[in-house]
Image (cartoon, grey):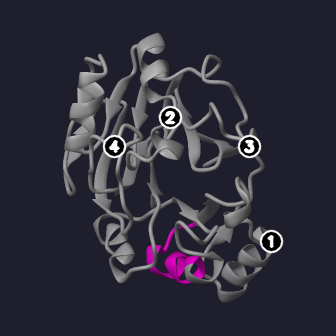
Amino acid sequence: MEIKFLGHAAFALSHDGKTVLVDPFLTGNPKAAAGADEVEADAIFLTHGHGDHLGDTVDIAQRTGADVVAIVELAAELEGAGLDKVHNPNIGGTVDLGWVSVRLTPAWHTGTSPSGGTTATPAGLVIEIGGKRIYHLGDTGLFSDLALPSRRGHIDVALIPIGGHFTMDRFDAVTAAEFVKADQVIPCHYDTFPPIQTDVQAFKSDVQNAGYAEVVVLEPGESHTVR
């Protein structure tokens, strides 16, 4: 399966002709690798409702007919915006679409939607697609329960925020990589805006020198094939 980095915390995961978008913040994203009217989606998974994660979900879902998975309170807001293929799990819940599944895990962050009308608990996403397990940690600070998803099943790739200020920084993210125990780590949520600029190559060196994982640094628009 293929992981394409769309910039910030947005990714496209593709396998066998189907694509799931995660946190499709494209419009207004200075690092966006595509426009909201250019991407295809069979499903959209959201970690939380902040504008830099909810992003273009409504427009993309209306255009493509994608299933949307979001935590229950945010899901209700999306249904109110006119979406009719919305799934509404809570932390610990799993949605299985047949070709892809996602389980919501805890993430330490905040989560008020851009409308200000919905405050919903942020989540991490454990996504199973194409025989691989991908863990998008979401926007989170470092906490020890990041180690728990791998107890349920081996993590092939972890998508870890490293920019600091709004999430863990690159130093805490090294410990997160130790906790998660993924084969590979792809860093995200850095360099989009001045407060989250960081040294991604230093993060890569620290993780790999410690032997925690292989780090794959992707520029927006680049893809990585998980074998």
Nearer the camera: disc 3 or disc 2: 3
- Label 4 SS: loop
Q: Which residues are magenta?
A: 173-183
Numbered tag placed on residue 116 in the rendering: 4
Whichever of labels 4 and 3 marks the residue nearer the N terminus, that label is 3
What residue did someone put label 2 on?
Answer: 21
Whichever of labels 3 and 1 marks the residue nearer the N terminus, that label is 3
Say which of 189 and 185 sits in front. 189
Q: Residues within 10 Å of mark 1 (few under 14, many from 20)?
A: few
| Disc 3/disc 2 C-alpha distance (Å) | 16 Å
Numbered tag placed on residue 31 in the rendering: 3
Quarter that holds the N terminus: top right
Q: Can see residue 225?
A: yes
Whichever of labels 3 and 2 marks the residue nearer the N terminus, that label is 2
| Disc 3/disc 1 C-alpha distance (Å) | 18 Å
Provide residue 127's location: percent of width, then percent of height: 40, 48
Q: Main secondary structure of the magenta part?
A: helix
Question: Pointer 3 and pointer 1: residues touching (CB < 8 Å)?
Answer: no
What residue did someone put label 1 on?
Answer: 201
- Residue 223 part of the magenta segment: no
- Amino acid carrying mark 4 in the image: Gly
- Amino acid carrying mark 1 in the image: Gln
- Label 1 SS: helix
Question: Pointer 2 and pointer 1: residues touching (CB < 8 Å)?
Answer: no
